């Protein structure tokens, strides 16, 4: 098993490094570093017949760094604190509404499509960052691994298509774009916002953390109601 483990961490770092370089050079949202890394690493695991459990065990340190990485997003918030204080009522309202919509729509669609309650519970926290989503899914009877996959998919789609959608809808305010991306596309969307503008990134960070708290508090009470309504 060790022969399958030792190279997983350096492989992940090298692939992501070159994916980041490619993304910076081409400057197209479709070339998202996370998406490129997934496209490269999954075929390599299949070709080498490496079980995901072995790969994950070798690169588990990256998973442990997720939580401090989320905390580090608080720094851009500090830089915009004076504006956030003046708008806190609107920000809380937007984040709360976005959280409810994300949880209700995801769970309802999953149940209407014939998903089991376990799968629906895994889909419910899809719009918050991975550590929070996995914890929420576990607390309401979901599968954390499926939640993590849903979170990654949602984040990638948000990072690729989010700003194009803003252009179509003529949304130009940095605060609006940031709050929308942070609410819907969590850390991956926030990273995309930070690349475009630091103010937008700050608001996205705020939405990411606020929605994580709201989802953690509401999900255990909301899920049984959704299960009753849509099952």
Image (spheres, rainbow, N blue to C red):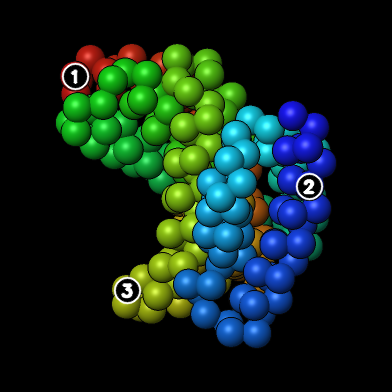
Q: Quick check: 66 above or below 141? A: below
**Which mark, by number, is residue 148?**
none
- Indicate the secondary structure of the residue bearing disc 2: loop
Q: Residue at x 53, y 72 (%)?
A: 31
Marks 2, 3: nearer the viewer: 2
What kind of element bears circle 3? loop
Image x and y of residue 152, in percent = 52, 48
Q: Is residue 137 left or right of residue 25?
A: left
Q: Which of 28 and 90 lies nearest the eye of the viewer?
A: 28
Q: Residue at the spot x=56%, y=29% of the render?
A: 134
Q: In this figure, which residue is indicated by the disc labeled 3?
A: 169
Quarter of the image with the N terminus is top right
Name the residue: 37% across, 41% down: 102
- Left or right of 81, for residue 6: right
> What residue does disc 2 label?
7
Q: Which residue is mark 1?
A: 231
Observer-nearest of 50 and 61: 50
Quadrant position of residue 188:
bottom right
């Amino acid at each position: 098993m060790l022969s399958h483990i030792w190279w997983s961490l350096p492989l992940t770092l090298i692939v992501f490094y070159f994916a980041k370089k490619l993304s910076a050079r081409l400057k197209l949202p479709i070339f998202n570093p996370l998406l490129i890394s997934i496209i490269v690493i999954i075929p390599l695991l299949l070709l080498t017949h490496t079980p995901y459990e072995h790969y994950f065990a070798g690169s588990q340190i990256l998973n442990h760094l997720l939580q401090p990485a989320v905390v580090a997003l608080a720094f851009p918030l500090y830089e915009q604190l004076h504006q956030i204080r003046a708008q806190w009522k609107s920000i809380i309202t937007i984040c709360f509404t976005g959280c409810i919509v994300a949880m209700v729509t995801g769970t309802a669609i999953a149940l209407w499509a014939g998903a089991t309650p376990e799968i629906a519970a895994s889909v419910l926290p899809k719009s918050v960052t991975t550590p929070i989503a996995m914890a929420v899914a576990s607390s309401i009877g979901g599968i954390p691994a499926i939640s993590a996959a849903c979170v990654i998919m949602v984040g990638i789609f948000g990072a690729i298509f989010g700003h194009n959608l803003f252009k179509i809808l003529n949304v130009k305010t940095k605060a609006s774009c940031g709050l929308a991306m942070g609410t819907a596309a969590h850390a991956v969307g926030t990273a995309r916002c930070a690349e475009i503008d630091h103010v937008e990134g700050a608001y996205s960070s705020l939405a990411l953390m606020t929605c994580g708290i709201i989802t953690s508090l509401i999900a255990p009470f909301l899920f049984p109601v959704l299960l009753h309504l849509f099952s």
